[in-house]
Image (spheres, helix red, strand yellow):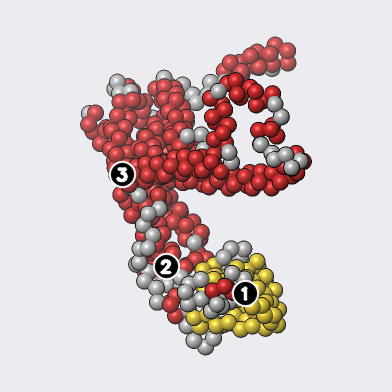
Amino acid sequence: MLKIIDLYLLKLYTTRLVSVFAICMLIFIIQAFWLYVDELAGKGLDFITIFKFLIYYSPKLVPLVLPLSVLLASLMTYGSLAENYEFVAMKATGISLQRAMLALVLFHLFLGIGTYFFANHIIPYGELKSYNLRKNIAKLKPALVIREGVFNDLGQMTIKVMSKYGDNNQLLKDIIIHEKSSDNRNRIVIKAESGELKSETTDAMLQMVLYNGYRYEDLIPKDITERNKYPFAKVHFEQYTMNIDLSQFNNVDLDAQDYTTTYRMQKVNQLEESIDSLEFGLNEQKELFSENFNKSNGLSQLTKINKDSSSLSKLLRSNILEFMKVDKKFKYAEAIRTSIPALRGTINNLESKKRNFFLFQKLINLHKITLYDKYTLIFASFLLFIIGASLGAIIRKGGLGLPLVLSVVIFLIYHYIGLFSKNAAEDNSITPLLASWVSTIILAPFAFLLLNRASSDKGFINLDPIIVPIQKIYVKYMGGKNIQ
């Protein structure tokens, strides 16, 4: 009898899980297509290439889609069973809610293990293929990927425009171009107030006309002594025409894999090695900077004085300018005036290093978050199943009405708690370990609270302590009837 019920529940649940997962994946893939439509459209790509990009991109959606699908499918399954009084029949035969969930609990344990291997092997591979395909697609027809406000690499030059306008965004405003020389150095800089992109008769050339600007070029004299003067040529122009060769961009190997080392492309063992090497490099840089900073700013003397408490107290009671060992022929004011620029330079140096160390630590935290997320995914689906099954037994509603609303609300709470905590972990406000597990930690007591109330045939929230006193007051003073 129990085996028949387990098989029935397993079949009913897995059918709905697969259906919900497929629908959710389709919705998220369509959303991803619209997210990258600007990068895919107008490049002359065939359907197979676009389909390959969406297939490579889809594995990274599984950690987002699977928990939502589990929550909705469990709500629909157990809500339908409770609505049709099938749970009443099970309880009449002595089968509790926990026993009715046992087969699916074991199913989710195996599903969690499978999800871990999927996150450790398939997702990094999909990220590798989709990221490289995106980069390779971006090289096709680069005129279409000139974005506003940033430098765009077009191979032979980098170009930045403040704004684009016109019917086809062919008109440009405030243009800065760094043109590369034969030795791959940026010796030519062109600035123009406006410009226009014009297509030639062949697809291999793109014509760009610049208006009212200047062309700067660094000159390299043959005489070595003249090179220290850094000579350059400056030319003003009212109209300047440039031809951009696009042939090298249209001959792009879309299957090339030039990017292979980002943290999203790494497996667990690779992430652990990267984290160790990055932390070692950060600590080494901090120690080296500390040592050089102490030597260059005379702090080593203070370190020696600090070891001798009597010398330190004597220094604090004395005039600090005496410690500076100012020559008698200089006045104290002159010493202070000359030290201010050095102090500002030291502060700027510290601020710059602080930013560099912050970015380095942020990269380490991103590696750690990616590593821990592979483990938290195992428990997230399990806990969301318990929440969905318990809540479905309580509300006794199946279908796609109320269960869909509750699923979306609970999932958004779970998702945004994790999102905000991971954003906080990036800047080291909290530890990456806590950030990855905080959603699961919050879910756990909520899941077992719902399971306990569903097993005891209690409602989601007991409002009797609030409603009953109000009813008594209404009956006593207003002459109303007690509402049962």
What residue does disc 3 label?
Answer: 269
In this rendering, which labeled residue sits more in front, label 2 or label 3? 3
Find numbered disc 3 in the image and state the secondary structure of the residue it sits on. helix
Q: Using the image, determine if residue 22 lies above or below residue 189.
A: above
Q: Amino acid at mark 1?
A: Pro
Q: Nearer the N terminus, badge 1 or badge 2?
A: 2
What residue does disc 1 label?
Answer: 231
Measure the alpha-carbon separation of dots 3 and 1. 53 Å
> Where in the figure is residue 248, as x and y percent of width and height?
43, 77
Q: Nearer the N terminus, badge 3 or badge 1?
A: 1
Q: Using the image, determine if residue 71 lies above or below residue 223.
A: above
Find numbered disc 2 in the image and state the secondary structure of the residue it sits on. helix
Residue at point 54%, 31% (across, down): 303
Residue at point 65%, 67% (across, down): 163
The answer to whether the residues at label 3 and label 1 have Cβ atoms under 8 Å apart is: no
Residue 125 falls in image quadrant: bottom left
> Where in the figure is residue 84, as x and y percent of width and height?
39, 33
Find numbered disc 1 in the image and state the secondary structure of the residue it sits on. loop
Residue 106 falls in image quadrant: top left
Q: Amino acid at mark 2?
A: Asn
> Where in the figure is residue 233, as x and y percent of width and height?
64, 78
Residue 466: tell me if it is visible: yes
Name the mark on residue 136.
2
The answer to whether the residues at label 2 and label 3 have Cβ atoms under 8 Å apart is: no
Name the mark on residue 354.
none
The answer to whether 360 appears left or right of 231 in the picture is: left
Q: Nearer the N terminus, badge 2 or badge 3?
A: 2
Within 10 Å of disc 1 (Cα), the crowding (few <14, some 14-19, many 20+) is few
